[in-house]
């Protein structure tokens, strides 16, 4: 599993070599580059050495072969169990090492497919950063020897072998992830877009802490009887909760009562979670997209004619390009692009939407004549979108009742307690009169073909990220702040790795549509996981979702559509 077959020495030799470097100029560390060391239970591959003490940490790979790891076959039997085991081992390894010298991509509450740790029949592979120690610009050789030849092997022995890891915790983590996958897999057959288990804890500790909220103020989720369903999980057994059916689901309620918290949990339900996260049995369909308005984004040859009629500028809505989209135009494009990429569920919050795209009330229609308003509001298209393309919508609304008439179901969240109020909402809509502007058909979604040259990263083809809101892709910085389902920087790096691989390997060939390119990505990730995107640079990243890759592709300012 290492990149080199030859071994340059054992642990004692490594210790002696590092100790001998003590006091040397920092550049002497470069002698360690591309060396492999036998640590006893594992091999250490020093893949990249930092140029100076202030540069990003050096990159190393630790490989524990199968005979030393001793992983039981049942923990390797399925992708969810392997992923959960890798996550469990990585967290334990990181805790044993500490974070002062070692950098591991452990992540937060999600159990993701990471390049940082892989497990299979060949054993365990962990990639991490090591800040090689210095005093000024002089090597602290004794400290380096302690870190690499003592602390690292001890942590391997204590955490990366089945005989020494927390086996109960590992099996529980695998069971939780496998259960979540089983619940998610049942949604389509049951005609559901999402499921929220009874007892789930949806609120998070804070805006910067994704752990579950604790304390007496927390209200555990309880499904309203009208929407209660039971799903089966291989380990948890029968799980009762709220099932949101396909179609148009409206979530209403007063401010601060939990409706956006519920929508956030649904957005996060495309991912699996660690045990005791509170949301580990909240699942949504994998191709669920959260969309919002995004002033100033670029749009490249997107057909937004479903939402936009004749523009006073003379631009053609069926082939619209702009470097500075308005809120309404950007949200219309995001909806169309999501469907083009394969989304079958849209999550929309009134708070982050362009009001004039969502609704148009009678008073405004009376003042501004319909022939002077090019926008067709989403309220008139949402049922047609489901009827024509099979795309469901879950919408949070707190200030407008216009969606009452078109909602298949209405859930009122009151102090974090959901109630089914569809009949009452429909009665209110009936008293106000039916909608006469609702569209019967949502137009066909155009099939765009990206130009390969426009997707190749410029410069040295480097990729990186700044938090979850910015992808650095070659010479370009791509604003991903509107892709709200991204929760970790490593996910953003994974998106960049996917775009680079798709462009470099000819998957974007000037003939394949965006949907076909994404299909190729799915095949690649299903076959090899993050390794399918690895370019040998030892960068930490997560295997991305196709919808997030599409979101980044559509926001590339260099993108050209043929």
Image: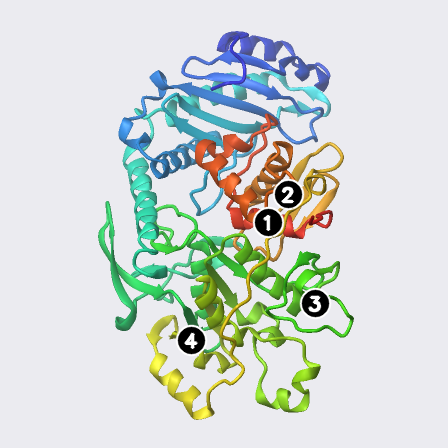
CB contact under 8 Å: marks 1 and 2: yes
CB contact under 8 Å: marks 4 and 1: no
Q: Quadrant of residue 221?
A: bottom left
Q: How much space separates mark 1 and mark 3, taking CA atoms?
A: 23 Å
Q: Residues within 10 Å of mark 1 (few under 14, many from 20)?
A: many
Q: Which mark is residue 465?
A: 2
Circle 2 SS class: strand
Circle 3 SS class: loop
Residue 77 percent across, percent down from the top left: 30, 32
Judge left or right: residue 2 versus residue 74: right
Q: How much space separates mark 2 and mark 4, taking CA atoms?
A: 39 Å
Residue 90 percent across, percent down from the top left: 44, 33
Q: Residue at x 42, y 75 (%)?
A: 407
Closer-to-camera residue (327/3): 327
Q: How much space separates mark 1 and mark 2, taking CA atoms?
A: 7 Å
Earlier in the chain: of badge 3 and badge 2, it is 3
Q: Residues within 10 Å of mark 3 (few under 14, many from 20)?
A: some
Q: How much space separates mark 3 and mark 2, taking CA atoms?
A: 26 Å
**Res 204 seen here:** no
CB contact under 8 Å: marks 3 and 4: no
Q: Quadrant of residue 76?
A: top left
Circle 4 SS class: loop
Give the labeled residue for mark 3: 326
Give the labeled residue for mark 1: 468
Q: Quadrant of residue 24?
A: top right
Earlier in the chain: of badge 2 and badge 4, it is 4
Give the labeled residue for mark 4: 407
CB contact under 8 Å: marks 1 and 3: no
């Amino acid at each position: 599993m290492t990149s080199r077959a030859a071994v340059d020495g054992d642990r004692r030799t490594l210790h002696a070599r590092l100790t001998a470097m003590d006091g040397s100029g920092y550049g002497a560390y470069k002698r360690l580059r591309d060396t492999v060391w036998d640590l006893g239970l594992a091999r250490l591959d020093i893949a990249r050495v930092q140029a100076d003490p202030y540069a990003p940490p050096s990159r190393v790979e630790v490989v524990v072969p199968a005979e030393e790891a001793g992983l039981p076959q049942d923990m390797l039997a399925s992708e969810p169990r392997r992923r959960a085991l890798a996550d469990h081992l990585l967290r334990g390894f990181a805790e044993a090492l500490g974070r002062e010298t070692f950098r591991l991509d452990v992540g937060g509450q999600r159990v993701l497919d990471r390049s940082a740790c892989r497990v299979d029949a060949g054993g365990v592979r962990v990639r991490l950063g090591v800040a090689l120690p210095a005093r000024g610009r002089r090597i602290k050789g004794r400290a380096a020897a302690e870190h690499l030849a003592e602390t690292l092997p001890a942590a391997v022995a204590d955490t990366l072998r089945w005989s020494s890891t927390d086996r109960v915790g590992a099996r529980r983590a695998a069971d939780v992830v496998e259960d979540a996958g089983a619940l998610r897999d049942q949604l389509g057959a049951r005609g559901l877009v999402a499921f929220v288990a009874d007892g789930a804890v949806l609120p998070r500790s804070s805006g910067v802490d994704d752990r579950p909220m604790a304390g007496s103020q927390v209200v555990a989720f309880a499904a309203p009887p009208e929407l209660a369903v039971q799903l089966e999980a291989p380990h948890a057994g029968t799980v009762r909760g709220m099932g949101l059916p396909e179609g148009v689901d409206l979530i209403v309620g007063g401010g601060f009562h939990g409706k956006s918290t519920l929508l956030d949990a649904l957005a996060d339900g495309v991912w699996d979670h660690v045990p005791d996260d509170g949301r580990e049995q909240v699942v949504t369909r994998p191709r669920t997209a959260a969309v919002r308005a995004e002033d100033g984004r670029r749009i490249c040859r997107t057909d937004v004619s479903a939402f936009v009629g004749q523009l006073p500028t003379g631009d053609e809505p069926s082939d619209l390009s702009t470097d500075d989209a308005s809120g309404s135009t950007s949200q219309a494009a995001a909806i169309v692009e999501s469907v083009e990429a394969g989304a079958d569920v849209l999550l929309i919050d009134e708070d982050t939407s362009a009001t004039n795209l969502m609704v148009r009330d009678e008073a405004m229609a009376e003042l501004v004549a319909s022939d002077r308003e090019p926008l067709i509001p989403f309220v008139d298209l949402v049922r047609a979108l489901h009827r024509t393309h099979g795309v469901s919508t879950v919408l949070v609304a707190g200030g407008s009742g216009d969606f009452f008439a078109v909602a298949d179901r209405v859930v009122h969240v009151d102090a974090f307690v959901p109630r089914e109020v569809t009949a009452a909402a429909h009665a209110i809509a009936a008293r106000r009169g039916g909608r006469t502007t609702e569209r019967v058909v949502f137009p066909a979604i155009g099939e765009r073909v990206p130009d390969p040259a426009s997707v190749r990263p410029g410069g040295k083809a480097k990729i990186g990220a700044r938090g979850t809101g910015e992808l650095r892709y070659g010479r370009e910085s791509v604003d991903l702040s509107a892709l709200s389902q991204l929760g970790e920087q490593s996910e953003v790096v994974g998106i960049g790795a996917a775009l680079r691989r798709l462009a470099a390997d000819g998957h974007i060939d000037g003939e394949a549509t965006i949907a076909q390119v994404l299909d190729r990505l799915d095949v690649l990730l299903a076959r090899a996981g993050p390794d399918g995107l690895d370019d040998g640079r030892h960068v930490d990243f997560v295997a991305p979702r196709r919808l997030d890759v599409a979101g980044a592709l559509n926001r590339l300012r260099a993108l050209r559509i043929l």
